[in-house]
Image (cartoon, rainbow, N blue to C red):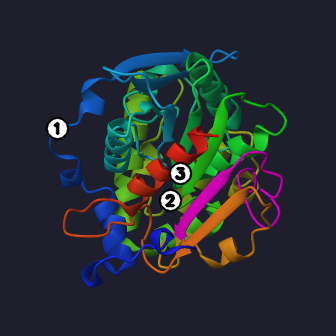
Amino acid sequence: MTCEDVFRPAWYLRNGHIQTILASSHFRAWGQNPMRDAARQLILTTPRGVRLQGFYSPQQASRPRGLVILLHGWEGSAESTYMLCTGKSLYHRGYDIFRLNFRDHGNSHHLNPSLFYAVLLEEVFQAVQQVAQQADQDPVFIVGFSLGGNFVLRIGRQAAQTPIANLRHVVAISPVLNPAKSTLRSDQINYVRKYFLKKWCQSLTVKQRLFPELYDFSALMSMRSMREMTAYLLDKYSDYDSAEEYFRGYTLLNDAISDLALPTTIITAADDPLIPVEDFYKLQLNDQTRLFIHDFGGHNGFIDGINFKNWYERKLGDIFDETGKR
């Protein structure tokens, strides 16, 4: 890595938990955001009839350098702080931005009666295909955070069989590689467990209110671990025999992404409290994939100073500018 590739935060930000908390802190998204102001809602319908919500922000005064599609993490949304800040930064650099909500994330619970599961790659891939087609000949880039990073890597793998012509580069930031381990770690960290349990219960409450004939989640509201809730939901509302079988469906270990067919960047941190760094060292990667493992950065953090800007926002712009010239 060059000096520019190394993330070196101020000394008071060299803590993975602080970085993780700041990544989603709302105050970082305060102030004017031309990207958000330019956004218009789009509902994408896949060939199987799944409807996904997204927000498209086109450049207003000039031809775009390209289109960047942003994918949030689990129980995040198009309005998550890291989505708004990254979108704003890249919008300023001249890119159109499309922020996609996964099923049952943001305010999209009403669009589909069935539940979100992280294994549902097909609908996300097809939504990305549609958005990329609307970009015409402009270069397209995808950035995913946490679970969104996992989706990005699976999209890159799927693109080897089903190419997206103008997709030039994909980036996974703090991607989940081993969901079973990450769920266990999340349950073991008090503030993380409380944060996700609260958001998940709120989401399920909305879903039940919209589709009371399909769902009764009352038993879940007293559960105190995500692992327990996952097992219950899968047993009652899916065809999976166990949580282990479900997690295997989107696990990305060892040689799982060795055949990525387009330029790929993976960014993670050794002090990420949710994602075991040792799994990244064991990945088998081809020469189209660059892996950055930083000493610091937490989960989705990489915040480098008192202005609370992300290191990767600038890095993404540099990567896309260079790729778009080719």
Q: Residue at x 47, y 44 (%)?
A: 72
Q: Nearer the viewer, mark 3 or mark 1?
A: 3
Sequence-wise first label, 2 or 3: 2
Q: Nearer the viewer, mark 2 or mark 1?
A: 1
Q: Which mark is residue 319?
A: 3
Q: Nearer the viewer, residue 198 or 138?
A: 138
Estimate how packed mark 1 is, as few (under 14), some (14 to 19) or many (20 or more) residues with alpha carbons within 10 Å: few
Does 121 appear in magenta? no
Please state which amino acid type lies under the numbered disc 2. Met
Q: Which residues are magenta?
A: 248-268
Q: Mark 2 sits on what residue?
A: 226
> Which residue appears at 50% of the width and 59% of the height?
226
Residue on which the image places disc 1: 32
Which kind of residue does numbered mark 1 sit on? Gln
Going by the picture, which residue comes out furthest to the front? 325
Label 3, label 1: how many angstroms apart (C-alpha)? 25 Å
Residue 29 at what x, y percent from top left? 23, 47
Give yes or no for residue 254 being in the magenta stretch: yes
Residue neighbourhood size for the residue with mark 3, other residues' Cα within 10 Å, grouped as few (<14), some (14–19), many (≥20): some
The structure residue drawn at horizontal position 39% and vertical position 76%, both measured from the top left corner, is 16
Q: Residues within 10 Å of mark 2 (few under 14, many from 20)?
A: some
